[in-house]
Amino acid sequence: MAQKSQNTVENNVKALFVMPLVYTVYPLQIAALSAYLKKNGHEVKYMEFLMGQHFDKVRQDQLSELLRTFDPDLVGFSSYEMSYEWIKEMSTFIKMQSDVPIIVGGYFATLSPDLVIEHPAVDIVCVGEGEKALSELLERMKTGKDISDIKSLYVKKNGTIFRNKIGNLTENLDELPFVDRTLISYQEHIDKHLGLISIMASKGCSYNCSYCSNFFLKDIYENSRKYVRFRSPGNIIAEIEECEKHYKFERIVFEDDMFALNLKWLRNFAGEYKKRFSYPFRCQLRPEVSKKETLTLLKDMGCELVSIGLEAGDERIRREVLRRNMSDKKIIDAAKNIKEVGIRLRTYNMVGIPEETIGTILKTIFLNLRIAPHEVQTTIYYPFKGTSLGDKCYKEGWIDYEKKKRLKLYANDSLLNHQTIPRPIIIMAKWINSATAFRSGKITFIKSGLQVLSGKLKSMFPYRLFHNFEWGKSHS
């Protein structure tokens, strides 16, 4: 692997993060890495590329100019499965102009590191959490030391791939700096997203859903018993106070997979939060923990909306296919508890799940009608590699590979060759299920959804029609 020859001990290493996207987001995972690297004295630049189906001439020229002006020592991509084709195109393009090392991290690289490192333009793959590994990589590059044995990295060197042991999780999250909000115009981002700022209070999830990467990620670390970790209440309070100094915002969204998993922690945080803030906030819960004491604490703090995973309305599909062992009654009771304390409810749902039928999809629609959420978010199941259900789909030959090349947003179409549900039914079910929010009286939300459905039925090419953040937001 070639490294930049002009890098010297006196100069800090410069890292360029590149993110190919369909729509603009705040890159929370890259923001965490950037903050850690900057804390250790390195220079970081971020650039997102809003993509069409291909890495076209306009974007090629933009990337060439960025490489020329910033002259990075390392180029990094954060990967998700549907962005990987773009990453291959862009990394190949970079190698045509520069010998700069290229590293790929993120969920897809962690779930499929051998596949990613095989690409000729990729020099390094980061498996798992990347703060410490990436910082060590830059330090060694700065001093010209060998990088082939850094934990959590797969390194390609002189035709040999060094697959190193995965480093430990950072157990004390308070050791990490606050995420870097200077990567993008963060105030503009806030203004476009309901005045919201994003905060992560914890890392990890203790559940084992078959379609989610958490089940795999728990087992790759030696200290995996610490996979679920919470920041201290004081540390989170300090981050919000830091945001107040620089930004104008009206509310907070806690991006945790499971915000109220630890009731003792929540009690402590609630007390500290109420002393200092009155911002309304949003969070995600499981139906199992949506009990009165937890919800009353959240409401008293200022929680305005809770999102829960309903996912499928058929109990057998939830239990045997998705590994979500919860009854309809558990979901109904959770929805009732959330509403009774005065918090708005959003449900996450999937259609087109393996083994689904039209009948099971109707159960999802009817369960949402019964509990009447204020918002209903529906996506189409996508078989992620590295998840137990996704790997089963590949093993059983259920994947449409041609469609996979074209699909860049998993919320829009099914990759599966369903034997029991026609594709148009799956697509229509997505929008019809989301329209069940009318039971809560949210008519404007339904109107926009029906407009999208109308266009979809005309074109049946969903990629061009996905432009609404709230209707298609990814969830795990």
Image (cartoon, rainbow, N blue to C red):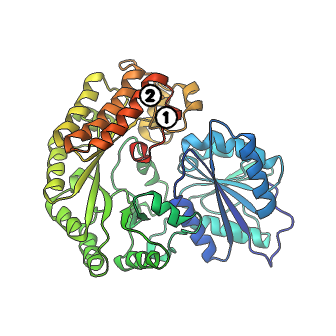
Camera-side residue: 447 or 304?
447
Front residue of 121/243: it is 243
Residue at horizontal 45%, vertical 76%? 174
In the rendered view, does 179 fall on the left or right side of 134?
left
Q: Of the residues shown, which amino acid type is indicated by label 2?
A: Lys
- Residue 315 lies in what quarter of the image? top left
* Residue at x 37%, y 56% (from the top left corner): 257
Disc with the residue nearer the chain's start (1 vs 2): 2
**Location of residue 170 in the rendering, given as x and y in whole percent from the top left corner:** 48, 69
What is the number of callouts on the image? 2
Q: Residue at x 64, y 69 (%)?
A: 135
Instruction: Tell me residue 468's x, y (percent).
Output: 44, 44
Specify few, some or many for label 1: CA neighbours under 10 Å numbering under 14, 14-19, or 20 or more. some
- In this view of the protein, can residue 97 be seen by the observer? yes
Q: Between residues 47 and 96, which one lies in front from this camera angle?
A: 47
Q: Tell whether label 2 touches label 1 (CB within 8 Å).
A: yes
Is 182 positioned to the left or the right of 68 in the image? left
Q: Is residue 41 left or right of residue 476?
A: right
Numbered circle sitting on residue 465: 1
Vertical position of residue 231 compared to residue 441: above or below: below
Residue 442 in the image: x percent, y percent?
Answer: 26, 45
Label drawn at residue 456: 2
Q: Amino acid at mark 1?
A: Leu
- Is disc 1 placed on a helix, strand or loop? helix
